[in-house]
Structure formats: structure tokens, C-alpha cells
Image (tube, grey):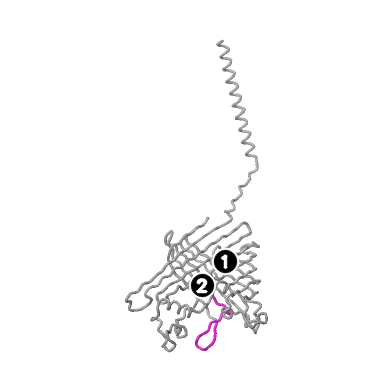
Amino acid sequence: MKKLFILSIAAALLSLSAYAQEANSAQQDAVEIANSAPVVPEKPKPSEFWYLDFNGNLNYGGTFHQNWAAGGDEFSHNLRAFIDANANYKKDAIFWNNRLQLDFGFLYASSKPILQKSDDRIYLESKFGYSIGENFFLSANFDFKSQFAKGYDYKTPGEAVLDQFKSDPADPTPDLESLSKAQKIRAWEDARVLKSGWLAPAYTNLALGVDWVPTNWFSMSVAPLTGGFVIVTEETLRKSYGMALVDENNEGLGYKSSRFELGAQIKLDFKVTINDKFKFTSQVVAFTDYLMMNEKDGGYGRVAWDNRIDFTLTKYISLNFISNMLWDSKVRIDNNDGRGEFCPVQWKEMLGIGLTYKIANK
């Protein structure tokens, strides 16, 4: 009986040893097969080709004067917000860059008891490119510029406006300061002069050409084929933005609401970022119209120069400076001195400090 028990144990041990050897051999075979199999590279995630960036900012400023000898508004408040968002794609020889900038602001001052628009801008740009050599790309660029709301030039109410508040036609013209608050608001609203509005004006362009990108902070685009429209929906503004005078449906002379352009464009882009604290972007766009290059029209050109500086002070506070310049040979302004109209260089600058919020996937 004892011998039978010992033989059973010995048989079991031999079986376990044989099983272990077979398992070890199978494991070695699996490792050899895995090492000999071709290595399949891991597919990159779609987000690895995209760079997404969002920057939102809200600025407030205010002043208050009491018995201030130098004068000025008793109080004023201004509020401005802007959004700068980017969605850029890069894979192999293809890139696709998209940028949206939205700016809007208003101010309220005791001297003019109405809300005044201080800043208003919509800018959308989308560029697609394909590499044709070192630092050179065939490109197609679309951009759109306009504003959200109506903008005015606030003239001081004169006699023609103030006369409506006479209690009797024989009375003298009332003084602006003698009016009630409701009357003052109405006087300032009646005296203001409309200067812009939604799609008045709006600029659209599609430019086909070549991009030169020698560094990551500078690029130049030359587009000998650029077409687009200038749109002015406000009828009273069409003349000042150079719309053509036509006889519309034999109902009398009027100005067209849009103008087609076909010409050449050069665009320069600068972008400098230092330690995620300081960011400077600048863009210069110059356009000339082939369709107006004759002696009768005198030619047509447009130059825009936009600058933006963002300096991050803390995680949620930043200092911002924005400058926009525009020269358009079709935009005419009256001198108001009897010398007729002239074509001005238009400037707008904004400086502010306020709350900021940023999101980026890289």
C-alpha cells in the first residue's frame, strides 16, 4: 500500500514537470513569434494635427470727477470685450489655419447721457495651403470683415435739434443744459450722424497665390488673383463708401449696395510669443483693383494694418493693446471747411487691463 502511494506521488510530480516544460516552451514560442512579427506604428490621434487656442478678455475702465479744476466729465464708464480664437491644422504638406476675432465695447459719460459704441469689429480668416517646396506653399485665403452694430459720430446738438424743445415757437433756442434728462437723450440721439452698421461696410475676399513661410513668426502671401465684394447695406452710407451711382429699375438714381473687386493682394503676418506671457501679432494687407486701373476711376487701393499685444500679468489678468489702421481710396470724408472731401487714414487704438481666460490644447 505504501509503495502504491509513493508511485502515485512520483507520477503526479512527473506530470507536473512535463506540463511546466510544455508551458515554458509555448511561452518561448509566443515570444519568438511576437518578435518576428512586423511592428505596426501607432496611428496618431486626430487632435495631434490640430492646434486649438481661445483667448477671451473683458476690460472695464471708469473715471469720476468732483470739483475738478481742470474739468472733464463728472463720471464715465467703459466696458470692452474681445475674443481671439484659432483652429490650425497641419499634416505633412497640408496646412489649414483659421482665426476669428470679435471685439465690442461701449462707453457712457455724463456729458453725453447715451451709450456710445467705442469698439466693434468682426474678422474671420481662413487659409489653406499645400507645400510646393521648402518654405513655399500654394494657398487659398478667405477673409471677412464687418461690425455688429450701428456706429455714430456724436455731434453736439445745434439749434436745428434744440428748437424742437421750445414750448412756444417765438421762444429763444433753449440751452442744452436746461433740458431734462429725457430731452437731453433725445437731443443727442437726433444730432448723431450714422457712420457704420451691420454689413455697412463689409469686406469679403478670396485670394489665390503663393505663401512664403521662412520662420514660425513671419509669413508673406502674394495673391495675383484676388476677388471679393464690398457690401454696404445702409443706403445713406453707400456714397461715402464709393458705391456706384445707377438708375435702379428706372425709378431714379441710387447707389448700388455692393461692388465687385478683382485685383492683387499682398499680406504680411507677424506673430511673436515669449514664454506664454507676451504675445504680439501684426498683419498688413494691401490690395489694388484691376477693374479700376484706368484714368477715369483714378485707380483704387486699400491698406489695412492690425496690431494686437497681449501681456499676461497673472493667470486671469492681462494687459492688452489693439491698434487698427485702414486707408481706403474710396472712403471720402468732408473737410467741413469748404475745401471738399478727402481720403483719410483711419486709426483706432485701445488700451485696457482686465480679466482674461485662455484655453489651448498644446
Task: Work out whether 12 lies above or below 333.
Answer: above
Residue shown at the point (48%, 59%) measured from the top left: 358
- Within-10-Å neighbours for mark 2: few <14, some 14–19, many 20+: some
Give the magenta range.
324-342
Task: Work out whether 29 lies above or below 248.
Answer: above
Q: Position of residue 291 (x, y in %)?
A: 66, 78
Q: Position of residue 23 (x, y in %)?
A: 60, 29
Where, by quadrant of the figure, is residue 317 drawn?
bottom left
- Farthest residue toward the top? 1
> Upstream in the sequence, badge 2 or badge 1?
1
Where, by quadrant of the figure, is residue 239 drawn?
bottom right
Assess whether residue 328 is covered by the magenta stretch: yes
Q: Amino acid at mark 1?
A: Leu
Residue shown at the point (61%, 56%) measured from the top left: 91
- Farthest residue toward the right? 250
Task: Work out whether 50 lies above or below 107.
Answer: above
- On residue 324, the disc is 2
Assess whether residue 16 is covered by the magenta stretch: no
- Farthest residue toward the front? 168
Q: Secondary structure at mark 1?
A: strand
- Within-10-Å neighbours for mark 1: few <14, some 14–19, many 20+: some
Q: In this orientation, which residue lies closer to the viewer: 332 or 345? A: 332
Q: Amino acid at mark 2?
A: Asn
- On residue 124, the disc is 1
Q: In this orientation, which residue lies closer to the viewer: 153 or 32? A: 153
How many marks on residues?
2
Marks 2 and 1: which is nearer the front? 1
Disc 2 to disc 1, how far (Cα)?
Answer: 15 Å
Which quarter of the image is occupied by the N terminus?
A: top right
Q: Secondary structure at mark 2?
A: strand
Residue shown at the point (33%, 79%) measured from the top left: 69
Where, by quadrant of the figure, is residue 11 drawn?
top right
